[in-house]
Amino acid sequence: MPLYMDFHRKINGLTAEAVAGAHQRDLRVQDKHEVKYLKYWFNEDTGQVWCLIDAPTKEAAEAVHREAHGLVADELTEVKEGSQSARGCRLRLRLGVQSGRVQPAQRFAKVRG
């Protein structure tokens, strides 16, 4: 199934508890639409939320949010999972999520011996 990343630009009054509650409501209705909401990230200061979704279609992914809580994303993009490697180094991206705030991505390389 395709993977999608959705983006909610501005949810006023966003809190960690509110996002967790909305995600739980997504999980309760997702099977009806043959969708899996896999993961989410958020920033309480800006009201932004991103969700990673495994769904047969964009419409199915949207239907879950619409039915679960009505907070349909501003953007929904099909994405592919990838990994990076080059010349014996493995590049990894780590997204630091602390205290409900998305931190800038940090890169680090692991050199193979």
Image: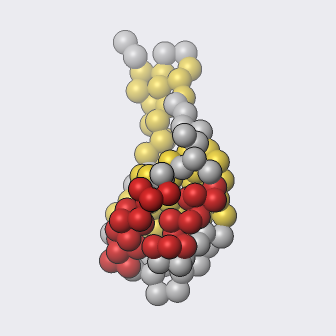
Q: Is residue 66 above or below residue 108?
A: below
Give residue 75's quadrant in the image. bottom right
Give the x, y percent position of residue 39.
42, 55
Q: Is residue 89 above or below residue 14?
A: above
Q: Is residue 102 visible?
A: no
The structure residue drawn at horizontal position 51% and vertical position 69%, both measured from the top left corner, is 65
* Residue closest to the eye, 94 or 20: 20
Give the x, y percent position of residue 83.
52, 31
The structure residue drawn at horizontal position 45% and vertical position 73%, both measured from the top left corner, is 68
The structure residue drawn at horizontal position 52% and vertical position 86%, both measured from the top left corner, is 12
In this rendering, position of residue 63 left or right of residue 37: right
Q: Quadrant of the C terminus?
A: top left
Q: Is residue 57 visible?
A: yes
Give the x, y percent position of residue 48.
54, 72
Q: Quadrant of the N terminus?
A: top right
In the image, farthest residue toward the top: 113
The structure residue drawn at horizontal position 48% and vertical position 53%, both measured from the top left corner, is 35
* Residue closest to the eye, 56 or 94: 56
